[in-house]
């Protein structure tokens, strides 16, 4: 039997849980039979509300896709999060940069390594890269494109939809990303809300 912890949107083997206290966190420990494929089990449980059984297909990038996705990697490198670095670039319908964002704490909030190392504390306080962009963007984003170095989470995708973002261009999720976050849920949000998704192969960058 394998023990799995549910913490926010993340599933981990209990023995891989990196030593921080689970007290006060929202988690469940469940038994998964040894003969079950753990990745498949996690995928099914995480995506139980989604009707999308597959991942989006990758396509070839335009020159602007290549340039702005490269910029998301630079912006992501500015994040102080030691484990997850995300960057987003918002461009207007004329391909002009409107806002940039990376995952981080609020302005003025102490940015110590200890706080970043405390997963529970981090999840409770971090502002996602896409949210940072939305906080610095114009009111109506109809016709705008958001570039991200990873697929936005369901919550961010919902906020992007609410602001009218038309297109989200992102690098195909890494194997590590797929283990930790949902693919189908944000894709479902984009599909229902009319956001065009464009997934770009990493090797073509
Ligand atoms: Zn997010």
Image: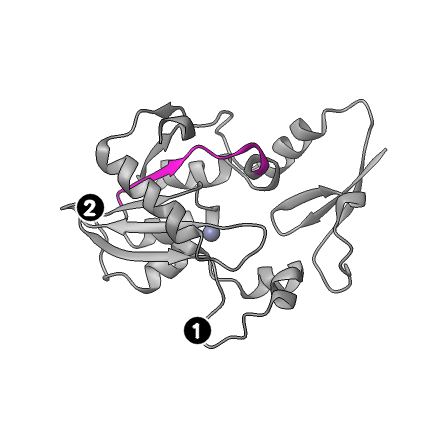
Q: Is mark 1 on a helix, strand or loop?
A: loop
Foreground mark, 2 or 1, reads: 1
For the N terminus, give its image quadrant: top right
> Image point 65% across, 60% down: which residue?
117
Asked whether residue 184 is in view, the answer is: yes
Start and end of the magenta stretch? 166-176
Give the residue pinned by disc 1. Answer: 107
Judge whether residue 64 is colored magenta.
Answer: no
| Place of residue 63 in the rendered image (x, y in percent of width and height, measured from the top left) | 22, 33
Q: Which residue is drawn at 58% across and 55% down?
A: 82
At a point 54% along the width and 75% down the height, the residue shown is 110
Q: Residues within 10 Å of mark 1 (few under 14, many from 20)?
A: few
Q: Is mark 2 on a helix, strand or loop?
A: loop
As drawn, the residue found furthest toward the right would be 1
For the residue pair 35 and 98, the one nearer the viewer reads as: 98
Q: In this view, does 93 lie above or below 98?
A: above
Decide: is 23 above or below 92. Answer: below
């Amino acid at each position: 039997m394998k023990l799995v912890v549910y913490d926010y949107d993340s599933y981990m083997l209990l023995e891989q849980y990196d030593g921080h206290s689970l007290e006060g966190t929202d988690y469940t420990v469940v038994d998964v039979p040894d003969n079950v494929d753990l990745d498949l089990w996690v995928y099914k449980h995480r995506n139980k509300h989604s009707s999308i059984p597959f991942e989006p297909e990758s396509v070839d990038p335009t020159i602007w896709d290549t340039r702005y996705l490269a910029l998301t990697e630079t912006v992501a490198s500015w994040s102080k999060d030691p484990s997850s670095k995300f960057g987003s670039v918002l461009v207007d319908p004329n391909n002009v940069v409107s806002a940039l964002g990376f995952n981080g704490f609020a302005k003025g909030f102490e940015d110590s390594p200890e706080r970043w190392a405390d997963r529970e504390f981090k999840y409770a306080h971090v502002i996602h890269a896409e949210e940072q962009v939305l906080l610095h963007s114009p009111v109506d984003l109809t016709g705008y494109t958001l570039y991200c170095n990873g697929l936005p989470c369901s919550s961010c995708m919902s906020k992007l939809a609410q602001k009218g973002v038309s297109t989200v261009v992102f690098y195909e999720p890494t194997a590590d990303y797929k283990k930790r976050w949902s693919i189908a849920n944000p894709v479902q949000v984009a599909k229902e809300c009319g956001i065009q998704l464009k997934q770009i192969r990493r090797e073509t960058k």
